[in-house]
Amino acid sequence: MKKTDIPVDADVKFGSDALIYCDWIDTTNFIVIGGRGMAKSTVILARRSLRCIRMMPGAPIAIVANTYANLVDNIMPAVQNGWKLSGLIEGIHYIKGRRPPEEWRRRCSCIVDDYRHVYSFWNGSVIFLGSLDNPSLLAGKSVAHLLFDEAKYASDARAARVMPILRGDAVSYGHCHLYGGVTVTTDMPDVTEGEYDWFFRYAREMDPERCVWILRAASELNRFRSVLTREQSKTPADGKKTERIQKRIDYYEEGLRKLRKGQTFFMNMSSLINIDVLTVDYLKRLYNGALEHHEFLKSVMGMRPGLRKDARFYILFSETHKYSDSTLSGEAAYDCSELRYLDPSREIDGGMDFGNMLSLVIGQEDGKTYRVHKSLYELAPGWMRELADQFLAFFEPHRNKVLNLYYDRSGNAYARQRQDYALQIKEAIETDGDGRRTGWAVVLKSRRQSTLLQDAEFNFMHTILEGKNPRLPKISVDALNCVELISSIEGARATVKYKGDQKIVKKVKKSEKLPLHKLPKLSTNFSDAWKYLLMREQWVKAVAPKARSSSGADSSVDAWLDDWMDDWIDDWKDANSNL
């Protein structure tokens, strides 16, 4: 629309892309992850709640936040400011915290006895205030739409307890596309710092193609409304023409209602979307010291963060240890024949962790470089057979069918009874589900291995990732086919403990207690499989002399080697006790 087409007295409004998406797409579920200063409360919550009020008169609605104090002191004042910008006046169109006029009460579709935590509106609609720190506020409530701010502070379980209030009156309000929907606003969560990302599941529900059609239809509707405003400003107005335009508007409004109903829109936006209001100087201040770099990327740029580098266990792991040209297509390989750097004529190695998730990483030496080519995993109820089937399918074209398997010491438990995990995965790979030989031979390389101590792992990984020891290979991980492994390495957190005066660096293992579906990328399981793959005897020995000379006391690597030898001698004595 040209600027000259706008009548002088027309109500023209300008807004950021966030406002346009909110007004034009406006699907049943609307999920926004936004940076600081994006006006999530003033724009998103205010305009979505106001549409619920106008399109479902008399309906009960709820706004929930992490704490009641935050909701009352910070969020609702911003929401009220958004209502004010849309023409609502407190005391005339709505009141808060007190009993409304009887005329308003009669229009309400639900019975409200306590108005202390309620906003009441002229058309009978009410907004209940709720918080995670006071769940009794919403006990027994039934609402037609739920607005959830600061969602990253709500655990999966707490969020699940709030959702049942979303039922409302389908007979009265089921026609509205906002009925039964949720509006979620928050900034980017950091799960490594105790925040939650349960709302990311809505991303899978989004139909991008349909959202594009909604946006196009809303753009046409906006154009027809502008044309109608221009025609109505003429003197005299052409009645027939305005009637035709109004029919087109009615057509698009009804079409949009059908397009939006039951749909989900998920968007992640940085603070830059509101740069005209915030100004570049504001962002410069945040970048140049007001926020730590990690926090700036998360809270301003909307980037999903990894663990801060100074808090990582594998502190030297960086982009130099990754490569992404492993396939010609630039995408993850369908099978091993697509891997450019894998030599099919040579044996391959595997590192495996037997935890609440089975994790397997595959590598192979490539001259002075050791490449990690593939990561595989299996979650319950799947077990060895399912993981072996994945391996057999992916590496079926590999000609040299020998797998040297390094694994956790626990894999050797019950070895004498032939019930150990190591033997189970060996048999599952060497024999398919129908009992036929696959042609693969699995060599168990960790039969005599003792526990790999975490401080020994820290020293070893620091040395091998540093890349300065000529007796060790350079490490390179396939970024296309080892996504879960890289995420696990970069997310492994370090903690420091003391044994007397000795400082010991340990890996935080709490992530292994996460729900099953979060384990592949967020737990330390895969990093442990990587550890078993790399911490083989000859490479550990290459690190030991350096570690021994760096301290007057026995190093953790030396202790590990001594422990390994003691266990080997004990096992030898047990095996030869009858001699």
Image: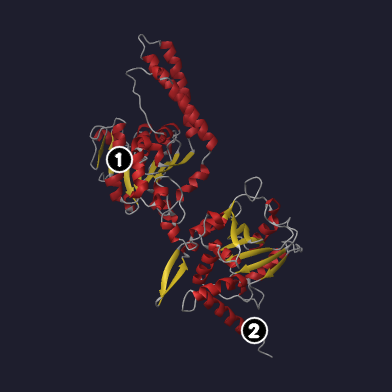
Q: How would you rate the neighbour count of disc 1 (Cα within 10 Å): few for under 14, some for 14-19, many for 20 or more?
A: many
Local SS, label 2: helix
Q: Nearer the viewer, residue 304 or 225?
A: 304
Image coordinates for residue 263, horizontal then vertical, percent: 49, 38
Image coordinates for residue 537, horizontal then vertical, percent: 61, 73
- Please say if 564 is above or below 146: below
Left or right placement of residue 93 versus residue 402 in this view:
left
Looking at the rendered image, the quarter that the N terminus falls into is top left
Q: Which residue is mark 1?
A: 78
Local SS, label 1: helix
The residue shown at (71%, 63%) is: 347
Q: Is residue 208 visible?
A: yes
- Please say if 389 is above or below 44: below
Does the CB distance between marks 2 and 1 fall below 8 Å? no
- Residue flagged by tag 1: what amino acid is it? Ala
- Please say if 272 is above or below 298: above
- Please say if 554 is above or below 293: below
- Residue flagged by tag 2: what amino acid is it? Trp
Ranked by sequence position, the earlier of labels 2 and 1 is: 1
Mark 2 → mark 1, Cα distance in angstroms: 73 Å
The residue shown at (53%, 66%) is: 463
Q: Which residue is mark 2?
A: 572
The residue shown at (47%, 29%) is: 256
Image coordinates for residue 483, horizontal then vertical, percent: 57, 54
Say which quarter of the image contains residue 276: top left
Frontmost of labels 2 and 1 is 2
Say which quarter of the image contains residue 120: top left
